[in-house]
Amino acid sequence: MAPPRGAARTCAPQQQLRGRSGTRPLGRTLQRIHPEEELTEIPWRPGKYLRSDAVASLIALNEEFKAEFGYNLGISDAYRDFAGQVEAKQKYGKGADTPGKSNHGWALAVDFGTGIASFGTPQYRWMKEHAADFGWRHPAWAEPGARLPEPWHWEFWGWAAPGADLAVGGAPSDAKEFARKALGGDSLQYGCLERLWTGESNWNPLAKNPSSGAYGIPQALPAEKLATAGADWLTNGVTQVKWGLTYIKDRYGTPCDAWSFWQSNNPHWY
């Protein structure tokens, strides 16, 4: 739904995002990733790609799976470019998400084989017990008896390798680390927040929407609203996260509620 007529958007739709490939339209930004530039190939599955942090966690998960079963996780599908999403929609109908909205297009979803593709197998039960430790979740809509039972479909929600730095540094002042701690270590809510602000700004404290002027990690509009969280709001990601978490709590309640709202709008905003 759109904001009420005449109401200002506090966090505006992000029209462009500056990344390693330059300025690109969002809404489809991560749906048209260039794999050779922005993704990592799954080592034992040539030609299949995911976001780099998802591959790192998948490698760790695979080592545990292989120790248990003696072979690698089977992967039938991972990242789909936009054309691939269109093809999947034509092939599977309701069994595939709308092109441009698929988690496969965000490079954050995998379709598994090797026994995981059937409910109740030892491999599926093992995944249900262990995958969350590595940031992988089986979505509620894909559970037995849900609207679209798919034992093979799993999604990455974020994972910090033991002893590893987070995306923008491992210091306590790091914006992602601060957000994780501010959410009490709730991996589900942090996963929603990570996706939300990756879509808005790629967690760049200097990100500015060239059309609206929305600014910072949470894309505050007007940008000066961030000043209520601290005098260093212009460049300090932690200060911006403080403001953004307060905004989300006041307006939506939780990051997952904000993320759900963001996904429902095209162009995206919250």
Image: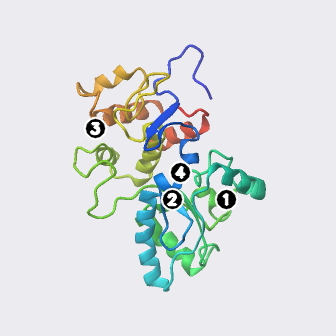
First reached walking from the N terminus: tag 1 or tag 4 = 4
Residue 182 vs residue 28, the one in the foreground? 28
Crowding around mark 3 (Cα neighbors within 10 Å: few <14, some 14 to 19, many 20+) is many
| Residue depicted at 43% across the width and 70% down the height | 59
Crowding around mark 1 (Cα neighbors within 10 Å: few <14, some 14 to 19, many 20+) is few
Residue 18 vs residue 232, the one in the foreground? 18
Residue highlighted by disc 3:
238
| Residue depicted at 64% across the width and 49% down the height | 82
Inspect the image, locate mark 2, and give the three-letter code of the amino acid beneath it.
Leu
Instruction: Give the residue at the far top of this rendering.
Output: 6
Q: Which mark is residue 50?
A: 2
Labels 4 and 3 touching (C-beta < 8 A):
no
Q: CA distance from mark 4 to mark 3?
A: 30 Å
Inspect the image, locate mark 3, and give the three-letter code of the amino acid beneath it.
Val
Q: CA distance from mark 1 to mark 2?
A: 26 Å
Residue highlighted by disc 1:
146
Q: Quadrant of residue 142?
A: bottom right
Inspect the image, locate mark 1, and give the three-letter code of the amino acid beneath it.
Ala
Residue 122, image x, y percentages = 56, 81
Q: CA distance from mark 1 to mark 3?
A: 39 Å
Inspect the image, locate mark 4, and give the three-letter code of the amino acid beneath it.
His
